[in-house]
Amino acid sequence: MPVLSMNGDFVIGGIFSIHYYIRLEQNIYTMIPAQPQCAGSIDFRELRIARAMEFAIHEINNRTDLLPGITLGYQIHDSCESVPMAIKFALQFANGLDLVFNYTNFCSRSAAPTVPAVVGDSATTPSISLARTLGAFGIPQVSHYATCACLSDKKEFPTFFRTIPSDEHQAVALARMVKYFGWTWIGAVRSDTEYGNYGMATFLKAADAEGICVEYSEVYYRTQPRSKLERVANVIRKSTARVIVAFLGTGDMKFIIEELARQPSPPLQWIGSEAWVTDPDFLRFNMCAGSVGFGVPRSVIPGLRDFLLDLSPAQASKIPVLTEFWESSFSCSLKGRTGSSDFLRECDGSEDIRALQNPYTDTSQLRVTNMVYKATYAIAHAIHGVICKDTQCNKSIKFTPWELLGQLKRVNFTTKNGFQVNFDSNGNPAALYELINWQFKKDGTLNIVTVGYYDSSNPRGQEFRISSAIHWLGGQSEVPVSVCSESCPPGTRKAVQKGRPVCCYDCIPCAEGEISNKTDSLDCVHCPPEFWPNTKQDSCLPKSVEFLSWDDTLAIILIVFSITGAFMAVCVIAVFYKHRTSPIVRANNSELSFLLLFSLTLCFLCSLTFIGRPSEWSCMLRHTAFGITFVLCISCVLGKTIVVLIAFRATLPGSNVMKWFGPVQQRLSVLSFTLIQVLICLVWLKISPPLPFKNLNHYKEQIILECGLGSAIGFWAVLGYIGFLALLCFILAFLARKLPDNFNEAKFITFSMLIFCAVWITFIPAYVSSPGKFTVAVEIFAILASSFGLIICIFAPKCFIIVFRPEQNTKKHLMSKVPSKAL
């Protein structure tokens, strides 16, 4: 018989898990087995939920806009969360109370079921069996608490609807919440039921897609041996994951919490499924403080509390389930039941139901209760759509379950307390959850607080809306950390540890020249060619550019020597010009001497073009200026050497060679030698000129800004031509070194050319091997050294005689013979 019932024009069925067990009796197979009976204590919360259906029907019967003139009745049964009981009631709804078929008159029975639709069951596993059975008869079923995603399969469950969102949404929401708070290393435990197994399977799939690793996934059901419970508790205690996702029914969760309390584990951050995290009965477990999870939105149902409290001992004594509630609540026996009750004290009438504080009277967290309220109203609206037209209803209309099923698919209304009710093609409502948190109140007790919302219809990444602060485990305000490995900071990359989940990894520093600018980077990236990582290797910085700048110490030293050399040349010019009529100046071909001094001045100054930031014009100028001025210089020296040789040849009797190398020929020879170098430079500049070049290869962390040679052939042709002239000059001067004269200039030219050649021969390997700005410094040093060699060796002796030995500056002294000595 139903635990609660009322007759009406149309009777709606209801199935709830008011008890959790059935009494098991061994069958002896000699007599008909007794009807299964519920056992265990009554669930006050489930009784409140069942009576919410009763309240909704009474409210509908009092309305004039919904089923006017029609009285709805109800038959509410207790399935004891048992599959056999659920199937029994499904057949009873389809066929009536006579469960033993009389096959003689079975075909003559009415094909119409005893109820047009059913609300329930509370648990997922009985609901699945109920849906299969009712579906065979076409009877619509609207569940208020069966959340298994499997029930969305319309091929298998064509008549199933629900007012609570599918676990598919809840599981995905839980996975995204875990990801949102940065937990990548979690534990998981589930009920060994369709609710737990299907829900956890969906969660694990979503968690894997979010990059979350699961250290363990345990399964438990309350009827399993105690050894199984202890093993699950030990796995939780020994785990390194500090966050645990519990997809458990209330009964299973209670067993696990009580077992963990025997030997407390390290503080855990519990993430709960809707089944237990919204149950106020768990608030007595302080170890669950800080728990977060999702629940259907909390609601207020006007008039429900007064309906629940409108219960007297006389009324309770008429209905067994209410009798059990009254006696359990007040620990007394109603009159006339002292012998058959578990309580020896008889209720004396002083019991005040309004003073009770238990889940039956607590209407502050009406979540699942509101789902029953909506389910009952959905069935009423569907019946209204079948038998009513406008405001007129015909109670005599006979309709099939399939007609009601079609109408139920189309319902769309808003309840009195403001909740929208409709179903999608799979019989599911829109998924909207409250994010709830267990927080301590000022008196030290726990309370369920709404701290945010989750709406699956929002765009990805915008599903969460946190409206207030969350209190985590231990009451702390900071989000707890649960990772297998700490996040890899920028500058490193993740390397998965062999044989472990992807969330367990080592942080490997990026290789040289690479960076990672994000936390937990999988790979490091190379910096662009002109950039180099900073010391932390988390960003690329522009490489420092190296060139011989004007403020560089080395450059300043070279500038000083360059200007000093040019000043020396100018001073020699001044001395020579002042004593231009003296024998020593005239004897050494004054015209070529002045031209040589001018070219040496240019040689000293051209070294300055090598200093500073290379540009297109400076690169072309420095090499061409150097090449042309040095050829001009060597050409003058070569001319002076030839003049010395011819001059001594001309002193021989009958010699007429001076007319072939007079002043005109000397000028033409210098001009010719110089023009050849000018031509080489023009060809070089035309074909492939030297241009600024960023050398990225020599230093990893530095750019060398230098003048590229352009055409290497052009560069070495310029140097080669200078070397050829210098070598020729050296040979001629060497041949003239023993010519008899008191002042044989060929000796000094030989010394100068020896120094010149030595400098430039040494320059080649030094130039090739010197890095960066030192390459330029070596070239400047070679220019200055060879220039100083020329000016000192050729002009220093003359200036010494002019300034300090004027008595030797006579024609007689210069023309006197001296014994020949080998150099």
Image (cartoon, helix red, strand yellow):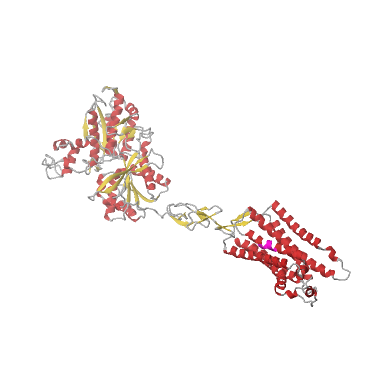
Image x and y of residue 84, in percent: 28, 38
Image x and y of residue 720, in percent: 72, 61
How many numbered tags mark residues here? Answer: 0
In this orientation, does residue 199 appear?
yes
In this orientation, does residue 30 appear?
no
Does 226 appear above or below 101?
below
Is 663 left, or right, of 700 in this rendering? right
Does 557 appear above or below 309?
below
Single out the residue that lies furthest toward the left: 348
At a point 66% along the width and 55% down the height, the residue shown is 620
Q: Quadrant of residue 51?
A: top left
At a point 70% along the width and 63% down the height, the residue shown is 600
- Pick the quarter of the image with the N terminus: top left
Is 646 left, or right, of 39 in this rendering? right
Residue span colored magenta: 600-604
Pick the front one: 387 or 660? 660
Does 595 appear above or below 232?
below
Residue 785 magenta: no
Is 773 left, or right, of 644 in this rendering? left
- Predominant secondary structure in magenta? helix
Residue 601 magenta: yes
- Pick the quarter of the image with the C terminus: bottom right
Image x and y of residue 211, in percent: 42, 48
Single out the residue that lies furthest toward the bottom: 819
Pick the front one: 190 or 225? 190
Single out the residue that lies furthest toward the right: 654
Image x and y of residue 405, in percent: 33, 29
Is 706 left, or right, of 379 in this rendering? right
Pick the front one: 241 or 317? 241
Pick the front one: 593 or 507? 593
